[in-house]
Amino acid sequence: MKNAVKGVLLSGLVLPGLGQIVLKSYKRGATLILVVLGAIGAIVIRAAGQALAILEKIESEGGPVDEETITQAVNQAASSGDQLLYTLSFLLIAICWVIGMVDAYLTGIKADRQPQP
């Protein structure tokens, strides 16, 4: 399999930056991986915090825990700041994914053009 195809598939289907790592562009690959993992971490930490806050609110109110109670608690807990964090994090991940695939393709083409020893 050609390096360009291998790099694009790894960066596009597995993890942005993995194609660069395989193609020996370690700094670019590590940077992309760290940015994507940081954005995913921010999403997970904020979502877990929201879930715990909702759970505490439902427990403090007592009464039955049903779908309607959970839905109301979630709607009250959602804020515009949270939406902005999620939107920016997902946008950052998407941008890194595109950059990772394009860069892996271009790096792979350069590697394919170099003479093999």
Image: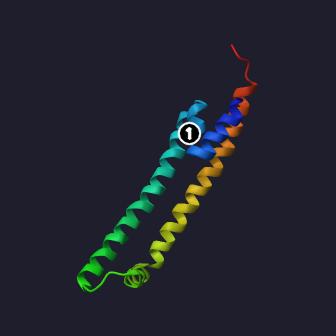
Q: Residue furthest right?
A: 113
Residue drawn at 73 percent across, 22 percent down: 114
- Amino acid found under the numbered disc labelled 1: Leu
The spot of residue 8 in percent (x, y) is 67, 41
Figure label count: 1
Taking depth in this image into account, of 71 and 31 the one nearest to the observer is 71
Label 1 residue SS:
helix
**In the rendered image of this protein, does residue 91 appear above or below residue 11?**
below
Q: Residue furthest top?
A: 117
Q: Residues within 10 Å of mark 1 (few under 14, many from 20)?
A: many
The quadrant of the image that shows the N terminus is top right
- In-image side of 95 versus 51 (left or right): right
Q: How is the image coloured?
A: rainbow
Residue drawn at 52 percent across, 62 percent down: 89
The spot of residue 49 in percent (x, y) is 34, 68
Taking depth in this image into account, of 34 and 47 the one nearest to the observer is 47
**In the rendered image of this protein, does residue 10 appear above or below residue 35?**
above
Residue drawn at 61 percent across, 55 percent down: 95
Residue drawn at 70 percent across, 36 percent down: 5
- In-image side of 112 versus 37 (left or right): right
Taking depth in this image into account, of 41 and 60 the one nearest to the observer is 60
The quadrant of the image that shows the C terminus is top right
